Image (spheres, rainbow, N blue to C red):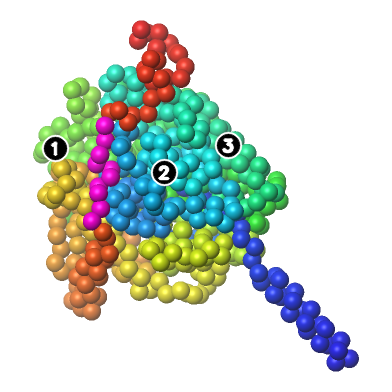
Amino acid sequence: MKALICICVITLSCLFHVSSERVPPNIVLLLADNLGYNDISIFGAPSSQTPHIDRLGLEGLKLNNWNSAAHLCSASRAAILTGRYPAKMGIFPRVFRVDAEYGLLPKEITLAEYLRDKNYSTSIVGKWHLGHRPEYLPTNQGFDEWTGIPYHMSGGSVDGHECFADTNRSMWLPLYENEKIVEQPVNLETLAKRYADRATSFIERNAKKKPFFLFMSFSHVHQLCAPKFGEEQASCQWSKRKNGSDTSTFVDAVEEMDWIAGQILQKLDNLKITNETLVLFTSDNGPWVAEQECSGSKGAFEGRWLYDNTDRACTACPSDYLPISPSNEEHICILPGTNRKLKGVPCGADTGLGSVWEANLRMPALVRWPGQIQGGTESMAIMSSLDVVPTILSIVKQDIPDNLDGMDLSSIWLDPSRYAVNTKDRVLFFWRDGFKSGPLPSPYGRFDVAAIKIGDRIKVWLWTKSSHYNEDVEMYHDPPLLFDVLSDPGEAFPLSADDYPDLVARIPRLVAEHKKSIPQTFPLALYHSIKYIPCSNKETNCRTSTSLSDIELA
């Protein structure tokens, strides 16, 4: 009898040990472009219907205090893929332009490279925006394959929508397959389906062979460029799957993105690998507020203090437009060299993309891994896009390098009911440019720490300013401007610095120590030349096929 009990105990012990050993999952990273916190249904979108993305939250973990690591797309994407502050990699002060000389340096190690070392197949579908010269393309940064565009959707002309900045009708938006341009300009009628087909094909080709990493980097919901012809607000979005017209709305773009996500999730279901796959959804940055209906919503993240403390006549304009005059209470903007006018927004309301106000930091985020992450759960622990690399490396049982700036939050993902790691004293630093003075050429001024977060709740402002390069001058705060961004997400009611003497006393030391950790780096995004603009064939004005416009041009 004792022998039988002993055998049973040993058997149960072995079974428990086997079941507690997690097999490293497939990884799917879904990344939106300039999507606001509440632009999807599960985060409170008033109009958009996103049932497929919502499913990730209903079946997984809703991360309510997720923060972008940077104020602009190239930097935020570099942070997601490397786990390091962009300032350390020279990815500042702006995004990589269509004529960029540099990109993410090959010496930087991406999540794709870490996972490939663990025998993962790796693929990116969609936007890259980390350099488009050959040495900077995804296939030289750890990805086995790539289908997508090299930068944002406003980076070039497409048929029926030529960019105001495209003076010689050759700056066509290209579509790449690996290192080759296969379509220029990209066909917007087929782009969403092409993205979905490429992503699902990659999954099917690898599902039964070895683990895979799919980076679905949506081109949605970034607007198109300021058009050479036609009305800006009537032609800025580009979803074609739903209504097939030239008047797509922001909601159409969000729902088309959700459709692509749905195709990917359905493929996981069909192949019966849903439980073997970790899916993370988030956005690189928040809404480009001055683009108004072409962009998303700030929701509760108003940045109200700035609105109340900025000259109401200061005007923020959509891309390529300028205020009609310095003092402009009606906020009229004009396209230079034309008579085309439209209405901008007050600088104090422009607190999204290009700033470090909450509308551009707090991103929607969802993570699902059935059987490992409990469905229908939520976490308010502060998290950052810097955490993607160390957390996933921990989950796939890969050593985490010492030089990463993110945290391993796998214990919170797997059990959000407890703070298995301490985030309550965590410090995050938020850099931006757009200062009136500094060593960088105008309008960049300098790249500096404008705000920090300490723990889950407290945000500390050193320098306040609106987005991008608006005319409002940055304001320095001594003592710092403090907000509890959980109880006051609109940043309307500053806390008294006198009530937080110990925290205020720590701030100079924290900032000094952080800056000391940032090496003197080359501002890679500043260097550019017209010779680096992607061109499939100069003899055809950088087009891969002829059209009526080419015949007219000839």
Q: Which range of residues does the magenta coloring cover?
A: 520-529
Residue 243 appears at what percent x and percent y? 51, 28
Residue type for callout 2: Asp
Secondary structure state at the residue bearing disc 2:
loop
Quadrant of residue 519 within the rendered picture:
bottom left
Q: Earlier in the sequence, mark 2 or mark 3?
A: 2
265 relative position to 352: left or right: right
The mark found on residue 198 in the picture is 3
Q: Nearer the viewer, residue 270 or 545?
A: 545
Q: Nearer the viewer, residue 110 or 155?
A: 110
Residue type for callout 3: Arg
Mark 3 surroundings: few (<14), some (14-19) or many (≥20) residues within 10 A: many
Secondary structure state at the residue bearing disc 1:
loop
Tag 2 residue: 33
Tag 1 residue: 328
Image point (56%, 67%), residue name: 414
Residue 185 appears at what percent x and percent y? 43, 24
Residue 179 appears at what percent x and percent y? 47, 34
Is 418 rendered above or below residue 257? below
Image point (57%, 62%), residue name: 396
How far is mark 3 from mark 1, CA to CA?
Answer: 48 Å
Residue type for callout 1: Asn
Residue 439 lies in the magenta stretch: no
Q: Is residue 371 visible?
A: yes
